[in-house]
Amino acid sequence: MIDPLILLAFLPAALALNLTPGADMMFALGQGLSGGRASAVAASAGISLGVMIHAAAAGLGLAALIAAAPAALEAIRWLGAAYLLWLAAQALRVQAARPDVPAARPARAFRAGLAVNLLNPKVILFTLAFLPQFVRPEADAILAQFLILGALLALGGFLVNTLVGLMAGGVAARFARDGRFQRIAAIVSATIFGLLALRLVLGARSAA
């Protein structure tokens, strides 16, 4: 269905993108610090599911419709920023109320990873710019090609983000009984979420 030569060109490019520090990687790092290894893995899985949904939307033409509507992109951008700020506040609130309880449970971390990825308009635009370069429009099953490429990109992202999250979770586990470390980890996680929100907001201003 996909030319092996195209895959040979796609895989290194996708791996380079997966290894480049970005919002998804930083989010997995924050989840590992605040919720531990299980939450980091769950958040990475949610992010990867978001990538697959973006790929499917691109293959169906839905992403192009959204990208062509500036108001829709802006709404998604500001919803994403608001959600990240809410996550930052939650990390601080939960840690302040119950210092012995992780700020993010795996199920919640999965939903958060999915939402953060879906509410990032940069991912929509990136998917539209990147994946079509490796799709053969003259071939049948255009959607299937998008899904295969999206799955490979999502898998690579899952492995990289999980590794980063597990390392952060390992540090958190080592100091699990240290209340001071837990407070610092919550502040660092909240700061990461806040900076990601600021990045979306600044992106909105620069695009204006």
Image: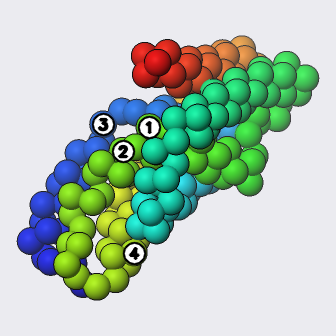
Residue 34, quarter of picture: top right
Could you say which disc has been placed on residue 122 in the image? Answer: 1
- Chain-order first, disc 1 or disc 3: 3
Specify the amino acid type for callout 4.
Leu
Could you say which disc has been placed on residue 20 in the image? Answer: 3
The residue at the point 23 percent across, 73 percent down is 137
Q: CA distance from mark 2 to mark 1?
A: 6 Å
Q: Residue furthest left?
A: 5
The secondary structure type at the circle numbered 1 is helix
Q: CA distance from mark 2 to mark 3?
A: 14 Å
Q: Are marks 3 and 4 in contact (CB under 8 Å)?
A: no
Q: Is residue 153 left or right of residue 72?
A: left
Q: CA distance from mark 2 to mark 4?
A: 17 Å
The residue at the point 59 percent across, 54 percent down is 46
Specify the amino acid type for callout 1.
Lys
The residue at the point 27 percent across, 60 percent down is 132
The secondary structure type at the circle numbered 2 is helix
Q: On the image, numbered disc 4 is attached to which residue?
A: 143
- Chain-order first, disc 2 or disc 3: 3
- Chain-order first, disc 2 or disc 4: 2
Q: Is residue 10 left or right of residue 164?
A: left
Specify the amino acid type for callout 3.
Thr
Q: Residue furthest right?
A: 97
- Chain-order first, disc 3 or disc 4: 3
Marks 2, 3: nearer the viewer: 2
Q: CA distance from mark 3 to mark 4?
A: 27 Å
Which image quarter is the N terminus in?
bottom left
Q: Nearer the viewer, residue 141 or 149?
A: 141
Q: CA distance from mark 1 to mark 4?
A: 21 Å
Q: CA distance from mark 1 to mark 3?
A: 15 Å
Q: Are marks 2 and 1 in contact (CB under 8 Å)?
A: yes
